[in-house]
Image: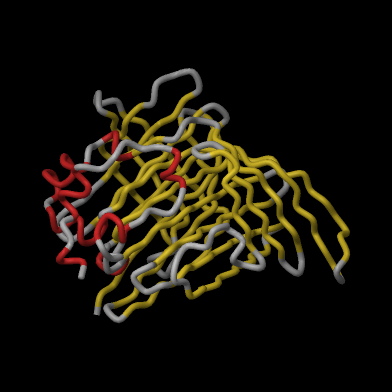
Amino acid sequence: MTEDINFKEFFENRDALSDKDEYMHDFIKDFGQFPRHHNESWYFNFIDRPNNVYFVTRLSFHMDTKKSRILCITIIDGEKNIYFNEIPLDKMPENWEFDKKVKYYCIKPMNQWNIKFEEKKFSLDVTIKGRFPVSNFGDIESPSAIIKKYGEDYLKVAAQEHYEQPTIATGTLELKKGGKVYETRNIKGLGHRDHSWGIRNWVEIDDWNWVSAQFEDMTINCYKVHLPGITPQMGVIYSKGKDNVIIENIEVATKTEEDGKTPVSSTFVLTDKKGNKKTLESKTISSVYLPLPSKKGLTEIFEQVVIFTCDGKEGDGISEYLISTRD
């Protein structure tokens, strides 16, 4: 059971990040079991506004329940395609081709991936390559500092090891009709990826905002999470030719549709370690609703493709909003 696992000792004594961390982690070796709410996921997105193509995919392993879940969201010319598959697993396959429609290939750890997605109406083949080095959030604020700040109960809800990377996506999109290709688009867009592993008990998270804002020579990546009694928040500003800037505080103001949930626009006021402030604004282009029901309640995720503005410059990316209600 999760409560019997000494997460504090494990996370305080973790090894330095290495290429092997791109792959599945062996919780059996570390803990003797997969903990309850075990979640290891690889996430990728890219935005190609000139081609009107937006893509998000997430591959996750839930080995405590021996399941893997694959999600692909593709928006082409405003038409949304959502593909979801849940696969029973006893262990991680030796390759990444265990789904007939979606295939993931790690070409160079911490730098380059290839993703292929085959649907009836289209085929997507993209190379995802880092445009800034990987940022390990555990190096920004150590696990022991996080435990001291938020308490050990935090580990039972969101004990995640976690790194992120701004990326460039290049490749091809073939549009099909009647089994034949009638148009090919050369994909080129900025994007983001992350990899996390550990505990994620979705319904116990009150809400969160996660942002990956891509500009020509800068990326702003941050998150703010509300858990019962605590509010973890952190971020990184990557800039071409400059050192990363660490975000310590995030203020969020959001306008929603009439449902009071679906974001239309948001303003993020970001404060770095030196007290400097930066304002990031988002305007939603398209929002995809992803409900996650459980025995304890409902978690709702709004994956939003947005236009960002900051310092007089325009960019794009993903603004993700999550909210949970417990029974």
Residue lying farthest top?
Answer: 241
The percent coordinates of residue 325 (x first, y second) are 29, 72
Q: Quadrant of residue 28?
A: bottom left
At which x and y percent is residue 218? Answer: 50, 29
**Coloring applied to the structure:** secondary structure
Residue 6 appears in which quarter of the rendering? bottom left
Q: Is residue 314 left or right of residue 117?
A: left
The mark tally for this picture is 0
At 63% from the left and 58% from the top, the residue drawn is 103
**Which residue sits at x=58%, y=61%?**
73
Q: Residue at x 44, y 19 (%)?
A: 242
Q: Is residue 131 left or right of residue 234?
A: right
Q: Residue 15: horizontal and vertical position, in percent?
A: 29, 39
Q: Give the quadrant of the N terminus.
A: bottom left
Q: Position of residue 272 (x, y in %)?
A: 29, 29
Q: Is residue 159 above or below residue 301?
A: above
- Relative height, residue 149 to residue 32 (above, below): above
At 43% from the left edge and 54% from the top edge, which residue is drawn?
A: 24
Of the 4 image quadrants, the one containing the C terminus is bottom left
